Image: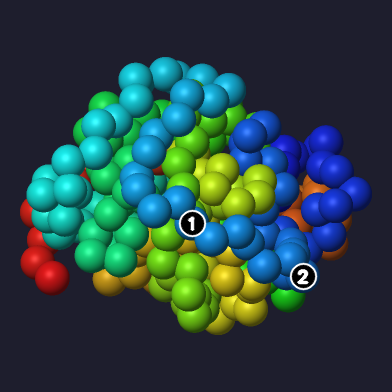
Amino acid sequence: MLRRQGALLAAVVLIPLATATQAGAATGTRAAPAQPAAACTYTPAVPADNYKGIPDFDPVKAARPFNATLRTSQGAITFKALTDKAPCTTNSFRFLAEKRYFNGSHCHRLTTARLYVLQCGDPTGTGSGGPGYSFPDENLTGATYPAGTVAMANAGPNTNGSQFFFVWKDTKLSPAYTPFGRVTSGLDVLQRIAAGGEDDQNGPGDGYPTLPVNIKRVDVKRGSH
């Protein structure tokens, strides 16, 4: 998705955001991404904000279904992790959540024109933060982004880190952002946040949400396929 608030590059014309290593993401017209890596590998990368280490990848553990609930200042948002379709991504999210990486952070970007997303996952709140590692894209073949999608922000192929976005209204994006979850509860919370508007600091319909979305904690619970 995009880059950071107040210092966006000209390339960020349409939207989702990311870190310094994740900076460019979702411009609606980006070229087709490179094919994802065959294996899940977490590669050290900068920045390393609120560093919690680098996760291991155990295919058996990564395949276990789970639900994640973000307890935010605007209400709870729960999503089902697509561990069967994006195990590398969901394993990373679970690792960060269990390490309390997201606790005390806030969602730093809301878009309300052409693209309809709320972006979170940067502990610096600038749109340039990252966890100290990157990993490959997954689940891109035929990817679409209807309301309730949870997907990764990035700065190009295979540059995923900690930043992700919720789609609060059906959105058209190139299949370049790994979908890794589906909202099961709290879509109304996202839509209320969107209805509150944003400050246009990145351009019309693109800025910091007017209703602050502070993430108090993220609870991970075992789920079912």
* Outermost residue to the right: 10
Amino acid type at image mark 2: Thr
Residue 46 sits in which quadrant? top right
**Which residue was labeled with disc 1?**
36
The residue positioned 67% from the left and 32% from the top of the image is 20
Given residues 150 and 169, the one toward you in this image is 150
> Which residue is at 72% across, 48% downward?
24
Q: Secondary structure at mark 2?
A: loop
Relative to 175, is 55 on the left or the right?
A: left
Q: Residue at x 34, y 45 (%)?
A: 40
Point out the frontmost of discs 2 and 1: 1
Please name the residue that numbered disc 2 is placed on.
29
How many badges with numbers are in the image? 2
The amino acid type found where label 1 is placed reads: Pro
Q: Quadrant of residue 56?
A: top left
Disc 1 residue crowd, few under 14, some 14–19, many 20+, Cα 10 Å:
some
Nearer-the-camera pick, 5 or 138 = 138
Asked which quadrant contains residue 111, the reply is bottom right
| One can see residue 198 in this view | no
Q: Secondary structure at mark 1?
A: loop
- The answer to whether residue 88 is above or below residue 176 is above
Image location (x, y in percent) of residue 53: 34, 20
Mark 2 / mark 1, whichever is N-terminal:
2
- Where is residue 116? Give x, y as percent: 62, 69
User: Does any portion of residue 145 appear in the rendered image?
Assistant: yes
Q: Position of residue 98 (x, y in %)?
A: 23, 33
Number of the label disc, if any, that sits on residue 91: none
Q: Is residue 188 above or below residue 86?
A: below
Answer with left or right where residue 189 lies relative to residue 106: left
Q: Depth check: 205 or 132 in front?
A: 132
Residue 19 position within the rendered picture, expressed as x and y whole percent measured from the top left: 62, 36
